[in-house]
Amino acid sequence: MIQDLVVHGVFIVYAVLMLMTLGLILTWVERKQAAIMSDRIGANRAYIRIPFTQAKIVWWGLFHGLADGLKMMLKEDWRPQAYDRVAYALAPWLAFVPVLAVFSVIPFGGRLEPGALFGEGAAGFFGERVYQLQVAPLDAGLLVVFALGGIAVIGAMLAGWSSNNKFSLLGAVRAGSQMISYELVIGLTVIGLILIYGTVNLGNIVEQQSGMLFGFLPAWGIFLQPFAAILFLVAAQAENQRIPFDLPEAESELIAGYFTEYSAMKMGLFMFAEFIHIAIIAALFTTLFLGGYNLPYMNDAGLLLPGGLEVAMPHLLVVILQITVFWVKVFLMCSFLILVRWSLPRFRYDQLLSFAWRFLLPLAMINLIVTAIAVWALGAGA
Amino acid sequence: MKPVIDRRKKYWNEPRLNWWERAYIFEVVRGFSITGGVFVRNMGRWITGRKGALTSYYPEEKRADFAAHNRGKHVLTQREDGRPQCIACNLCATVCPARVIEIEAGFDPDDPAHPKFPIRFEIDYSRCIFCGFCVEACPEDAIRMVPDVPGLTVTDRSDGMWLGKQELLNWQPARDPAKPYPPRPAKGDGAPSTDTDPPASKQ
């Protein structure tokens, strides 16, 4: 019992730290990648001076995220005159916490045997226990993702409603209808995967993606459901409210959308939630479609190269390798999402909704029907 | 049947997308490949130690490709002996619509042809509008504008954005068609030297 507490406590701290760091780094990545994509240099003026010397640590502008955070902490926390106090204070947290909590069901590595890792004392303490590298190995994993995603909408709606501003309210209404539309699309695309894998437990889904397909393709979801992968990415970008779907924030029309009236760290929370949401979407996509922590030709025991060559690896190396593979995939996905954000122009609002209801939704349904028929036909054969 | 000719003036764009473009996803992928290609190219340049950007790292680095007709900075031309050609007549300061030029005139008894010279000649670049009236007003061809930037990044606002006589006299072109004599080589800080004798023809 106490062992479980220790392990999961470590997992929770690790997950929160990783997400916070990733959110901070993503602000830098977004700036730098956008700059390099458009032939610019990018933010590189923030530095830390080593005390008593003139040596400045610039590190390609990595400290701009810290400088931003510091600025937001020190700014005046201005509030509108007439506003709903409770809802106003609650809204940023309702936008931020669910996004963070979604990560609890995402497996960021394979199996962990703490007893086999840290010598004799640990072996005596942990015994033969085996843990999934996952904060909460729930059977209802995917459902939890959708439940928490639904709460994030409430954050945006509350923020718009409570700040007593027409722009905020417009942004909130837009956020609400947009998120509901695209949540539906995400749900329908993912049902195809659930049909194939027969479970909503994300850990099981990732386990089923190890191994090979037809001998040469990794058995990743993107090769089983390429159509669903594209639809999922589109809908997830819309869910994240980033360009080309950033209508709730649309600076040119709504100032800043539903968080117009927020300042200082409350506004920072909204921004931070958005960046962590990128990481979460990347992690979800990695888990569902890119095989999670799986590397081709690798399993929990070591490498299994084509030609029957087996290379056994120590448990520690396997765990580290799996975690690294997961984060590398997540980071590449984040980079791709940022590429999308800096490549495409914004939709008009009617285009946005008709795109969801008249284009994505039918496609998702067709995809679902085809998948269901294929699963039924193959299952009948087996 | 006669075809109906629509003579109304068309002020809108006809939709010219074909089915491939209207499918959206292919054109989106093409866009990604363009932006991603630029990213990979520039990233490769940065990694291999070259410069992967068109912009310049401004105060430390000045762009080399100013257009020949760029007029971004004032210079004071020099006499043969390196003193400013300016006679402190204050015409430029008078004509200046932004009133940014400040001149303090001095008396030079050693040069009877040009007894007045500027002790101070300062331009406030925080207000200068780069209209070039000063250049037009000057009767002596003493002030000109060149393709350059003042280079006045300061960290303290109270420092202001002033260029003084020293910096304005720093101009040392290799060739100047408006003057018969070749310009002198740079004298360190570019300050006018007083130890050389004026040429005999000016006496």
Image: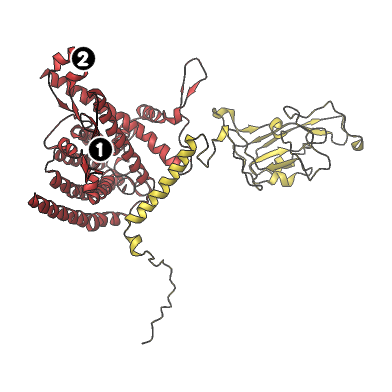
- At 15% from the left edge and 55% from the top edge, which residue is drawn? A369
- Colour for chain A in the figure: red
What's the mark number on residue A307?
A: 1
Could you say where residue B10 lies in the image, as x and y percent from the top left? 43, 71
Tag 2, which secondary structure? Answer: helix
Read off the residue under disc 2. Answer: A119
Q: Is residue B145 above or below residue A101?
A: below
Q: Which chain is yellow?
A: B
- At 28% from the left edge and 54% from the top edge, which residue is drawn? A352
Residue A133 versus residue B142: which sits nearer the camera?
Answer: A133
Q: Which of the two labelled residues, at mark 2 and mark 1, occupies the earlier sequence position?
A: 2
Could you say where residue B75 lies in the image, as x and y percent from the top left? 71, 38
- Dot 1: few (<14), some (14–19), or many (≥20) neighbours within 10 Å? few
Corner quadrant of residue A68: top left
Q: Nearer the viewer, mark 2 or mark 1?
A: 1
**Please, which chain is the residue tagged with disc 1 on?**
A
Q: Is residue A290 above or below residue B165?
A: below
Q: Is residue A1 above or below residue A95?
A: above
